[in-house]
Image: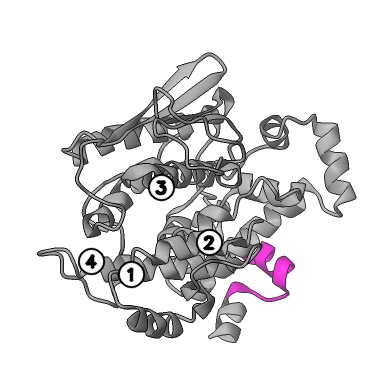
């Protein structure tokens, strides 16, 4: 699991803040963010946690809303990304990644009058996700309208294209609970000296290309959506921290399977064979490797259900019967027995203990 990202990326984000340096220092202290962000250049190898990066991004969005006409925003309002939220909701209830991307492309075209959108094209085993940027826009990367919660925009310029495409790549992986290995990444702009963005995409970018696009194996299109309404709210509230949770550097097979199981238990859970196929493993190999890690497929499913149950109980917004349905149990008593087996307490006892 990727828990940190390079500090230099957070510093680049901070430069978009439309406030004086003294105000930035106070803002960072209030948001419990490291003052190292104010340094002119990051120390090589310096990192920031994904949670801190998420708090910085959300703070920046709030700051920039104040610079937009007729877009007043309560500083305590956490209902960010109104336009994106609606699009993500449509994607969340799709059957698989293919349908989710189709829905998002249509939604983007309807919401974005300037022509910015994206499209997918499948060529046999390879699928291209092609981005259409507004090359004639007079917006700069620091333009407040890029971060309007009511609009859909790709970020402009080379840096904006890198950020937009990288976040969309991560978002696709988040929806299916699996990091998507890219086969190619192409950008129409000329390269900046000494940068190939291998640390962003997992492989170098081809510059001065005929398109702005990335390619991946078409098998990912058939991966089902594994997120839930609850996990979507968490993702939006901490954006973009959750998008870095799924990482190519995460070598734990158990953790990868937990991502594939996801958090939406109202859908049919993937079978052992389903998971093995998505990981390009045989079922005996999957059994053996999980045993080597001291766990099993059934234990991982139980852990995911337990984590979801505890999260719901901490929220205190659902009855036991509602929780049983949300978690895919046949009835309340079955959920009751399972939860007591996991935690040693009934759901009611847990709720009373944690309140």
Q: Nearer the viewer, residue 226 or 11?
A: 11
Say above or below: 52 vs 108: below
Mark 3 or mark 4, whichever is nearer to me: 3
Mark 2 or mark 4, whichever is nearer to me: 2
Magenta range is: 336-347
Which residue does the image show at 61% across and 36% down from the upper left? 203
Which residue does the image show at 80% across and 49% down from the upper left? 296
Q: How many marks?
A: 4
The dot on residue 78 is: 1
Check whether the beta carbons of the residues at disc 4 and disc 1 lie within 8 A of each other.
no
Say which quadrant the N terminus sits in.
bottom right
Instruction: Give the residue at mark 3.
Output: 159
Q: Is residue 218 in sight in this rendering?
A: yes
* Chain-order first, disc 2 or disc 1: 2
Residue 7 image offset from top left, x and y in percent = 55, 64
Which residue does the image show at 40% across and 67% down from the upper left? 14
Q: Secondary structure at mark 2?
A: helix
Mark 2 or mark 1, whichever is nearer to me: 2
- Is 340 part of what is drawn in magenta? yes
* Chain-order first, disc 1 or disc 3: 1
Instruction: Give the residue at mark 2.
Output: 8
Q: Is residue 267 in sight in this rendering?
A: no
Mark 3, residues whose alpha carbon is within 10 Å: few (<14), some, or many (≥20)? few
Instruction: Give the residue at mark 4.
Output: 65
Check whether the beta carbons of the residues at disc 2 and disc 4 lie within 8 A of each other.
no
* Chain-order first, disc 2 or disc 4: 2
């Amino acid at each position: 699991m990727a828990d940190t990202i390079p500090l230099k990326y957070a510093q680049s984000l901070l430069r978009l803040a439309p406030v004086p340096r003294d105000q930035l220092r106070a803002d960072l202290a209030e948001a419990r963010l490291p003052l190292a962000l104010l340094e002119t250049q990051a120390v090589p190898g310096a990192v920031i946690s994904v949670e801190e990066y998420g708090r910085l991004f959300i703070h920046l969005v709030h700051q920039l809303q104040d610079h937009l006409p007729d877009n007043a925003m309560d500083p305590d309002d956490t209902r960010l990304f109104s336009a994106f939220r609606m699009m993500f909701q449509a994607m969340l209830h799709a059957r698989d990644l293919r349908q989710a991307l189709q829905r998002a492309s249509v939604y983007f075209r309807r919401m974005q009058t300037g022509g910015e959108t994206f499209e997918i094209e499948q060529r046999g085993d390879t699928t291209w996700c092609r981005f259409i940027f507004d090359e004639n826009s007079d917006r700069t990367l620091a333009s407040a309208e890029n971060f309007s919660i009511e609009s859909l925009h790709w970020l402009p310029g080379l840096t904006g294209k890198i950020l937009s495409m990288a976040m969309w790549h991560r978002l696709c992986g988040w929806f299916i609970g699996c990091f998507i290995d890219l086969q190619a990444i192409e950008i129409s702009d000329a390269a900046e000296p000494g940068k190939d963005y291998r640390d962003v995409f997992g492989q170098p970018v081809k510059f001065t290309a005929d398109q702005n696009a990335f390619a991946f194996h078409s098998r990912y299109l058939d991966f089902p959506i594994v997120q839930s309404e609850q996990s979507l709210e968490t993702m939006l509230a901490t954006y973009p921290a959750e998008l870095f949770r799924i990482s190519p550097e995460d070598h734990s097979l158990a953790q990868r399977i937990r991502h594939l199981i996801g958090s939406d238990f109202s859908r049919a859970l993937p079978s052992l064979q389903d998971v093995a196929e998505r990981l390009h493993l045989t079922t005996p190999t999957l059994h053996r490797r999980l045993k080597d890690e001291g766990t099993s497929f059934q234990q991982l499913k139980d852990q995911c259900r337990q984590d979801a149950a505890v999260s719901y109980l901490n929220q205190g917004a659902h009855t036991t019967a509602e929780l049983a349905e949300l978690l895919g149990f046949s009835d309340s008593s079955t959920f009751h027995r399972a939860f007591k087996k996991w935690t040693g307490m009934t759901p009611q006892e847990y709720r009373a203990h944690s309140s």
